[in-house]
Image (cartoon, rainbow, N blue to C red):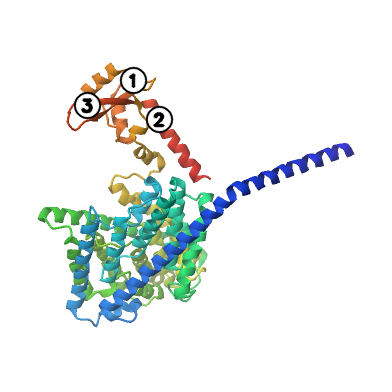
């Protein structure tokens, strides 16, 4: 017995020693690189945090100068006293400047925002457009300062992407590292912009990277904290909305009302998103129909916004003052409904005119107004079993924003961090879950993924839908010199039938030709400039395409579960 016990102890000690030795080797060989990566994440977080802070302060300073107010948080109250021609002229001038910037520095006169960052994460190895991105930042700065009705998170997120892209290019980062650095930059920018470290980190994971891999979590949290510290050094440790707790939830009796509110907000979010897409299509149709120069399109949208703002200055900018009034319950039922409708119209005009900005802050305003209107009605119908109707404004704010962003987790947390109130969690979570579930069925998961779907970029369905578009035929085909090359005579026959592809096309395009071929392969040709006759350079075999696709799926799964 003693010998057996001694043997077991000896074996356990040997295993422990081997584990310690292996741990030291890992620390020696991998530790410094991991620490170095975290340091890079910290530097990116600081840079993105300062960029977001500078963008926010730039909007405040320029807005204050244009509208002549010392407190931009009370902008719409001040705008009431301004001459009508000033309210009308500012967004027109701003739109003209935006149009000229985008016309000069982008190829399609379109502002880059969150959807482009998601595309860069999925398809661009964590890189985004730099030149167009910088132009979009300045265009959005002008838009938000001169009466455009949108939010600042869109340009801030893309600006962060430009910073991470610059770093990734300098260190020659691979796809996984580039995406992780992109997530770090986005988390820091969101945290610095909204003083929301938890939501900033989860936003990067849930919306941009679209996975919760462990290897990405630590550096993203480091960057998010860095961005938050930068915000608090300037604004202090205060919530975006300083509010009093709206009241306790009458749990068992009142909970069904928040379920209904979530469904209502899901429909409102879908209408909000669809109105933007309709306005974009209508704007493009009118531009083409009447031959309007693309640089003039934002100015025309500015004229429409200025006309609305003469009577309803609540639509100007991000709308924090109106949102705050809704959360405090200081609006009447008809005011809440009218302001929600007008804000939706104004946001649609802003995006339809390609003026720039984001959708998060407007969705908060529309949600708070919608929730307040629902709460006033609900508490009026059943006053004896209802809590404060402002609680519905909180829940509605989160429900609409979560459905628009397609991010129920990070939106739930950002509502808590924006308000500094964690006692309203049940109501917010119930409403968010219902609104997100419903709205995701009415659009392609979220506003951003629907934007990409409208550009024929199929990210909403997952990697299995878009990985084929990332693989070029040239990297998979068998050349004519390959030992397993296709029969050249048969290739010539297929080319004569028009069954052929070029090396630059993707597997997504090549699959259609593979289905036409009964030989299990399709010829790959090059058209020389001086000769119209196709020159055979190889063949793409169906089995090779499937192997490449399977490898891409395996690499994606390994990244998302590491």
Considering depth in this image, is 521 or 472 the residue closer to the camera? 472
* Rendering quarter of residue 110: bottom left
* Rendering quarter of residue 140: bottom left
Residue 450 has which mark? none
Give the number of the mark in front: 2 or 1.
Answer: 1
Which structural element holds mark 3?
Answer: strand
Whether residue 78 is situated above or below residue 504 in the rendered picture: below
Q: Which residue is mark 3?
A: 534
Between marks 2 and 1, how big is the CA–CA gap?
A: 17 Å
- Whichever of callouts 2 and 1 sits on the residue coming sooner in the sequence is 1
User: Which residue: 40% across, 47% down?
Assistant: 125
Q: Which residue is mark 1?
A: 486
Q: Residues within 10 Å of mark 1 (few under 14, many from 20)?
A: many
- Whichever of callouts 3 and 2 sits on the residue coming sooner in the sequence is 3
Q: Residues within 10 Å of mark 2 (few under 14, many from 20)?
A: some
Between marks 3 and 2, how big is the CA–CA gap?
A: 26 Å
Considering depth in this image, is 492 or 262 the residue closer to the camera? 492
Q: Residues within 10 Å of mark 3 (few under 14, many from 20)?
A: some
Which structural element holds mark 2?
Answer: helix
Q: Which residue is mark 2?
A: 546
Taking the view exactly as shown, the residue that stands out farthest to the right is 2
Which x, y percent locates residue 191? 45, 64
User: Which residue: 48% across, 41% down?
Assistant: 557
User: Which residue: 31% across, 27% down?
Assistant: 514
Whether residue 72 is situated above or below residue 208 in the rendered picture: below
Between marks 3 and 1, how big is the CA–CA gap?
A: 16 Å
Considering depth in this image, is 426 or 521 the residue closer to the camera? 521
Which x, y percent locates residue 97? 21, 66
Left or right: 304 as drawn, with respect to 398: left
Which x, y percent locates residue 60? 33, 74
Check the picture and name the quadrant holding the N terminus.
Answer: top right
């Amino acid at each position: 017995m003693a010998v057996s016990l001694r043997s077991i102890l000896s074996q356990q000690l040997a295993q422990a020693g081997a584990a310690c030795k292996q741990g030291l080797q890992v620390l020696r060989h991998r530790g410094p690189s991991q620490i170095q990566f975290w340091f890079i994440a910290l530097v990116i977080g600081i840079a993105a945090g300062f960029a977001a802070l500078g963008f926010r302060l730039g909007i405040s300073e320029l807005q204050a100068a244009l509208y002549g107010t010392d407190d931009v948080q009370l902008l719409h109250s001040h705008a009431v006293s301004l001459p009508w021609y000033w309210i009308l002229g500012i967004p027109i001038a701003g739109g003209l400047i935006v149009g000229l910037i985008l016309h000069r520095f982008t190829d399609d006169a379109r502002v880059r925002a969150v959807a482009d960052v998601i595309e860069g994460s999925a398809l661009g190895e964590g890189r985004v457009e730099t030149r167009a991105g910088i132009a979009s930042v300045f265009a959005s700065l002008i838009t938000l300062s001169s009466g455009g009705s949108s939010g600042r998170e869109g340009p801030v997120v893309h600006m962060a992407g430009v910073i991470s892209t610059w770093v990734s290019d300098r260190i020659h980062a691979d796809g996984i590292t580039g995406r992780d650095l992109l997530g770090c930059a986005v988390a820091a920018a969101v945290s610095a912009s909204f003083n929301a470290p938890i939501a900033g980190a989860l936003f990067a994971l849930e919306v941009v990277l679209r996975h919760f891999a462990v290897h990405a979590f630590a550096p993203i949290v480091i960057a998010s904290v860095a961005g938050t510290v930068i915000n608090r050094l300037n604004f202090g440790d205060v919530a975006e909305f300083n509010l009093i707790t709206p009241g306790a939830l009458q749990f068992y009796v009142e909970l069904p009302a928040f379920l209904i509110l979530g469904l209502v907000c899901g429909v409102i979010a879908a209408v909000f998103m669809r109105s933007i897409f309709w306005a974009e299509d209508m704007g493009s149709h009118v531009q083409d129909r009447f031959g309007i120069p693309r640089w003039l399109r934002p100015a025309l949208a500015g004229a429409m916004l200025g006309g609305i703002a003469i009577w309803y200055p609540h639509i100007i900018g991000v709308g924090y003052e109106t949102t705050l009034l809704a959360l405090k319950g200081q609006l009447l039922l008809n005011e809440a409904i009218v302001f929600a409708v007008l804000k939706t119209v104004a946001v649609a005009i802003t995006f339809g005119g390609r003026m720039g900005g984001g959708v998060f802050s407007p969705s908060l305003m529309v949600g708070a107004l919608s929730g307040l209107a629902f709460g006033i009605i609900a508490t009026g119908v059943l006053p004896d079993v209802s809590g404060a109707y402002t609680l519905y404004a909180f829940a509605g704010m989160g429900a609409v924003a979560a459905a628009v962003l397609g991010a129920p987790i990070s939106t739930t947390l950002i509502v808590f961090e924006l308000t500094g109130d964690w006692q309203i969690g049940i109501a917010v979570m119930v409403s968010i879950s219902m609104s997100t579930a419903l709205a995701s069925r009415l659009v392609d998961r979220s506003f951003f993924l629907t934007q990409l779907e409208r550009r024929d970029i199929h990210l909403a369905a997952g990697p299995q839908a878009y990985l084929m578009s990332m693989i070029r035929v040239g990297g998979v085909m068998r050349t004519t010199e390959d030992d397993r090359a296709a029969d050249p005579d048969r290739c010539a026959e297929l080319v004569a039938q028009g069954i052929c592809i070029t090396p630059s096309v993707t597997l997504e395009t090549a699959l259609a030709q593979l289905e036409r071929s009964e030989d299990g392969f399709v010829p790959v040709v090059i058209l020389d400039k001086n000769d119209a006759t196709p020159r055979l350079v190889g063949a793409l075999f169906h089995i090779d395409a499937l192997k490449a696709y399977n490898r891409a799926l395996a690499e994606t799964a390994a990244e998302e579960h590491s």
